[in-house]
Amino acid sequence: MSLTTKDKNTVKTFWGKMSGQAEEIGCDALSRMLVVYPQTKTYFSHWKDLSPGSAPVRKHGKTVMTGIGEAVGKIDNLVGGLITLSELHAFQLRVDPANFKILSHNILVVLAGMFPNDFTPEVHVAMDKFLSALALALSDKYR
Amino acid sequence: MVEWTDQERTLIANIFANLDYEDIVKPDVSCHHSLCLRCLIVYPWTQRYFGGFGNLYNADAIMNNPMISAHGVKILHGLDRAVKNMDDIKNAYATLSELHSEKLHVDPDNFRLLSDCLSIVIASKMGYDFTPDLQAAWQKFLTVVVFALGRQYH
């Protein structure tokens, strides 16, 4: 399920519309993930406050969205372009890759809620494919 | 048996009370809210189950296909049955599960795909009203539904 040229252009265009609210999107997606899929909280036992919109959640949401923005810029070669991030997730963070899917779903839920008119089925499929490809690139160094 | 808090029951009942089935399945002017349309486009391999539904060649064809809209309404009525039998969805869905397994031969992973699409359609309709707590209750409900639908597969 590789990204077509049309997918890449759709992602870049939509990113242009949403990047101004990246921090809000990241915060909301992460908040939802922690509430709706509580098993994901196991990765953040070192945070004082895991409640929706808390300071550590907001800060980390911004970190995640910055990474996604970087990936949009490297959409033509995600595996090659995200080697450092992949190594980070593989050797240090060791996040079970199943969780990338969970976070991706919550990002899509937030995008649908925030941009109901722009998040068309065509944009939805392109973003879903992009986030899946990104997850694959992030898990590249795992084994 | 699944335990539901009073809050979860209320939240889930409220989502259904505010759902306009015709609205969810038929495309609006910008065709964003159609459940089946979205599922068939985002996960195109799901089209394999609708060979007898006529033209599904592109988004426009799917959007204007009355059999697809009718099927969307059917699915939502099925979910309504789960809401009305929240304390025993497993048994309420026993015949439905057998139907999907023995007659329709639907891969049960598709139930999860459709439920993900449904969450996204509801998020786009409700916006900020689809709070994390509401999403959590809703996701719990969908997980139970998906499990019940897959239960009679052997």
Image (cartoon, coloured by chain):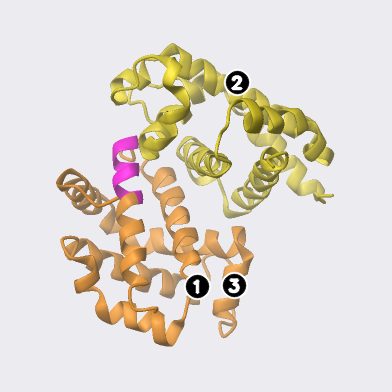
Chain colours: A orange, B yellow
Q: Which residue is mark 3?
A: A41
Q: Is residue B94 left or right of residue B50?
A: right
Q: Are marks 2 and 1 on the same chain?
A: no
Q: Is residue A116 left or right of residue B25?
A: left
The chain to which mark 2 is attached is B
Q: Quadrant of residue A82?
A: bottom left
In the rendering, which numbered label is found on residue B109?
A: none
Label 2 – label 3 distance at C-alpha:
37 Å
In the rendering, which numbered label is found on residue B74?
A: 2
Q: Element type at marker 3?
A: helix
Instruction: Name the main secondary structure of what is drawn in magenta.
Output: helix
Q: Is residue A35 left or right of residue B30?
A: right
In the rendering, which numbered label is found on residue A96?
A: 1
The amino acid sitting under disc 2 is Lys
Which portion, as a residue range, is magenta? A121-128
Q: Residues within 10 Å of mark 1 (few under 14, many from 20)?
A: few
Label 1 – label 3 distance at C-alpha:
13 Å
The amino acid sitting under disc 3 is Lys
User: x and y percent of residue B121 in the render?
Assistant: 48, 36
> Is residue A5 shown above or below A83?
above
